[in-house]
Amino acid sequence: MRLVLQTDRFPPGALVTGTLHLDETAGSCEALLLRLWWAARGPERDTDEVVVATEQKLDHGTLSEGVTYNFSIQLPLHPLSHEGHLVSVQWALTARIQWSADQPDTIARVPLTLTPGPLTDREGLSAAWSKAWKKHYGVSWFDRAWTMLTKQPLRLSNTTTSPGETVQLSCDDQVLAYAWRLVRIEEAARREVVENHRSGRRTIYRWTVEARIVCEGQIPLRGEPDARQAAVAIPPDITASLLLPTRRIRWEIRISTAERDVIAPLVILPG
């Protein structure tokens, strides 16, 4: 049994088309399944999770030797394939024959690469990411109200962007900024901590992190003397944000000041 694809690299939301060949495979089966799945793995190749994105039933009953099946199966928008120090995301397409008799399944597998590309549903993906990040941070209603009432030291024109785009940022006029940094944080082991808070008890997730600065530069002053504004160009080869149950790739814009650093989280969409 062989899986043959036209290509092994696909943009988000693309159709994976190919042919399944039953070269020397025959017999009575319960199902002939086609599964598109991805796995997240840690630094020691331990599998954190395996997710079946979609599944198709190509046939059942008696399979004849030499028969071919043409198929097309659609990829989701996320997550992208990624090879990092702390987390890797690997995609694959698997054909599986579940035999009727008491014998092991026959499996054929080909790896895929989900690469950045044009987004077919940017607004939908952006909305899904915003909802996921709010749930991940677990911000209480008190904190949300406090954030709306107080002036944040660092503000972004848009909190979701894509590689190659520009984000406008502005600082509080009381912040004396001299450099900005765009930082990637690959987050590893998660630990839940329950703490008392003004609005009651809440669960906070703490992480073991590894950060890598990908770009930095001086903030140009524009407009009024007390204004602190800048246009940050997102690098075109940057990795999209990754949100998994046990591991993350999170981006943030960090402005270094004389007294402290101010940070604003940023979600980078693929494409």
Image (spheres, helix red, strand yellow):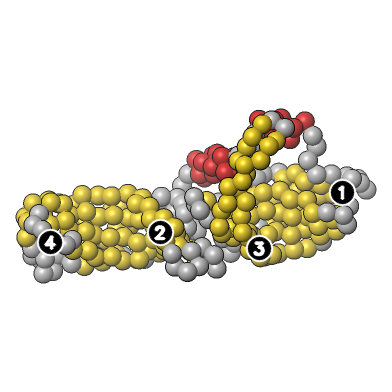
Mark 4 vs mark 1: in front:
4
Residue bearing mark 2 = 39
Mark 4 and mark 1: Cα distance apart in space: 69 Å
Q: Which residue is mark 1?
A: 175
Q: Is residue 106 above or below residue 153?
A: below
Between disc 3 and disc 4, whose residue precedes?
4
Separation (CA) of disc 2 from disc 4:
26 Å
What amino acid type should be assigned to the residue bearing mark 2? Ala
Of the numbered discs 2 and 4, the one sitting upstream in the chain is 2
Regarding mark 1 in the picture, which secondary structure is present there? loop
- On the image, the x and y values in percent for residue 187 come to 58, 58
Work out whether mark 2 precedes mark 3 in sequence or the reverse, and give the earlier one.
2
In the picture of the structure, the residue carrying the numbered disc 4 is 103
Q: What residue type is disc 3 on?
A: Ala
- Residue 133 visible? The answer is no
Which of the two discs, 1 and 3, sits closer to the camera? Answer: 3
Mark-to-mark CA distance, 1 and 3:
24 Å
Q: Are there few (<14), some (14-19), or many (20+) residues within 10 Å of tag 2?
A: some
Circles 2 and 3 in contact, beta carbons < 8 Å: no
Pointer 2 with pointer 1, Cβ within 8 A: no
User: Farthest residue in the right direction?
Assistant: 225
The image position of residue 229, as x and y in percent, is 81, 49
Residue 211 is marked as 3
Helix, strand or loop status at disc 4: loop
Side (left or right) of 119 relative to 159: left
